[in-house]
Image: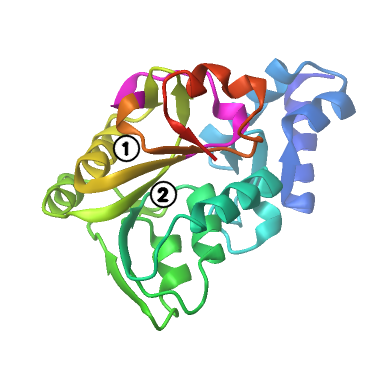
Amino acid sequence: MNKDKRQDIILNLVNSKRKVYSNELAMELNVSEDTIRRDLNSLSAEGLINKVHGGAISKTQKYYSYNHNLIINNDKKESIAKKAVTLIDDGASMIISDGTTNLTMARFLPNDIRATVYTYCLPIAMELANRPNIELFFLGGKINKNSLVTISLDVIQKISRLKVDYAFLGTGSITPEGITEGSYEVASIKREFVTASDQTISLVTSDKLDRKQSHIVCDIDEISTLITDLDPTDKRLDAYRATGVKLL
């Protein structure tokens, strides 16, 4: 099967199913996952699909859609979210970064909780806008239409003037040395989150453990709590446990 025909099939599957996974496409089309990833990258570059971690979703759906079924690894993210909300005291102040794990956490906040929340992520702001006891601040600026977040110098300046109880970081990659991100702008914003908070809490699905990207967010000793979908005693967390970071 040539590339054009294969990509036509992939595009039809994405549009009909709304969400596809790279490993399933590889099995169905009898090619390697690397080939599928290249196909998805090509279709995404043409603006025909939205490529997400582990697969792709239809261009007609946003990555931050309110449809739970479109969130990759939803079960893992719900497990993390349930742990995260147990840390939040009534009346607390917090910054919540972008990411579908953090969006899931926002959904799990108790309806009657009193809190002050700052975020630069539009879907999280919209999720919390109808909570009567949450004082909500959207750190505005120019919105990236693909990710629905504001990433600019204005956001960094606003965060630099804050002091909050907690910063909840959606985490792109982490090693026992610390958190890194692929985007310079995102890493810069999250560094300000760490500085602005009394406690920095990293929310990370286990597939992002032991991965490193180009831009440093913070060292491991700047993280108060690391929350994953794993049991805290899991051997995959041994190296993190040895750093002294609290595991949930």
Decide: is 203 above or below 136: above
User: Which residues lie in the magenta part?
Assistant: 203-220
Q: Is residue 134 above or below residue 191?
A: below
Residue that carries the numbered disc 2 in the rendered image: 98
CA neighbours of label 2 inside 10 A, class few (<14), some (14 to 19), many (20+): many
What residue sits right under mark 1 in the picture?
186
User: Can residue 123 be spotted in the picture?
Assistant: yes
Residue 247 within the segment the image draws in magenta: no
Question: Which colour style is shown?
Answer: rainbow
Q: Residues within 10 Å of mark 1 (few under 14, many from 20)?
A: many
Q: Residue 42 appears at what percent x and percent y?
A: 59, 28
Q: Please report contact status of discs 1 and 2: CB closer than 8 Å, yes or no.
A: yes
Q: Nearer the viewer, residue 23 or 79?
A: 79
Q: Which corner quadrant of the image does residue 23 belong to?
A: top right
Mark nearer the N terminus (1 vs 2): 2
Q: Name the residue nearer the viewer: 98 or 145.
A: 98
What residue is shown at x 87% (from left), y 25% (from top)? 27
Question: Is residue 83 or residue 171 the one in the foreground?
Answer: 83
Q: Secondary structure at mark 2?
A: loop
Extreme-bottom residue of the structure: 132
Give the amino acid type for the residue marked by disc 1 in the picture: Val
The disc labelled 2 sits on which kind of residue? Asp
Can you give x and y, in whole percent of width and height, for residue 29 in the image? 86, 25
Residue drawn where x is 38% and y is 27% of the image = 179
* Label 1 to label 2: alpha-carbon separation: 9 Å
Q: Is residue 122 left or right of residue 216?
A: right
Relative to 46, 243 lies left or right: left
- In percent of width and height, residue 79 lies at 64, 49
Q: Secondary structure at mark 1?
A: helix
